Image (tube, rainbow, N blue to C red):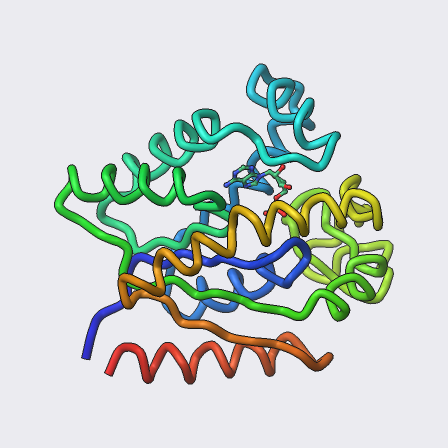
Amino acid sequence: MKTLKRFVLVGGPASGKGTQARYLAQAFGLHTLSTGALLRQEIEACSDLGRQAQSFMDRAMLVPDEVVNDIVRGWLSNNDETPWLLDGYPRTVAQAETLDSFMRERGLGVDVVVWLDVARELIEARMLKRKECTKCGLITRDGEMVCPDCGSGMRVRADDNLEAFARRWQDYEALTVPVANYYEAKGLAVRVRVTEEGEPEEVSLRISQKLKEFAE
Ligand code: AMP
């Protein structure tokens, strides 16, 4: 039985990564770094990093590898001892290679990569209804005005519109699916294909089941 301590979560835009990251963090006691959420916070705080990221995110483009790699390296350096999950990183094969060499230097490695492979039609419909909490980042699907978890205001994400989605999906297929394939070739990927609308809890159960089989 393998012990799983270092997780990567890969998935398309609005595939439910944030929600599944929460379930996984709870189940395995993980610290989570969501590069997307961190970048949105930096934009809100008007930091240098935020300004740099915003010019790309406003155009629904990926932030350059060097910028994101630096963020992740800094975060991982402070989390060597803690089990963790990276949500939304790596998103390009170059990022995956950087992560690999960084981990190798520390005598560590990624234990498992969960690939949330959700059909595009499902995501498009879902994305137009989703909202994100301005404070704790909770994602909801039913147009709530107030966060059910922490009571803060909810907002629609600036990049949740059909035009931005089409661009993000293109990047996902061209750049991020190869990341999933890269980890599949290493025998580290657990692929969960979702083709029918269902509750996030059901997807979470399927992920747990597959992780159990993977660890055996
Ligand atoms: P997410 O919240 O994961 O959907 O990410 C939102 C946006 O943040 C993405 O569309 C990118 O512009 C940026 N971003 C997040 N993670 C990365 C990454 N690993 N590489 C490049 N850009 C990223």
Q: Pick the residue in front: 154 or 55.
A: 55
Q: Is residue 153 visible?
A: no
Q: Quadrant location of residue 95?
A: top left
Q: In this view, does 68 lie to the left or right of 144?
A: left
Residue 59 occupies quadrant: top right
86 relative to 115, above or below? above
- The answer to whether 169 appears left or right of 11 in the picture is right
Q: Residue at x 28, y 51 (%)?
A: 82
Horizontal and vertical percent position of residue 101: 23, 39
User: 12 above or below 96?
Assistant: below
Furthest-front residue in this view: 174
Picture coordinates of residue 87, whole percent (x, y): 49, 52
Q: Where is residue 105 in the image (x, y as percent from the top left)?
A: 16, 37
Position in image of residue 129 (x %, y %):
84, 60
Which quadrant of the rendered structure holds the N terminus?
bottom left
Q: Residue at x 62, y 33 (%)?
A: 41
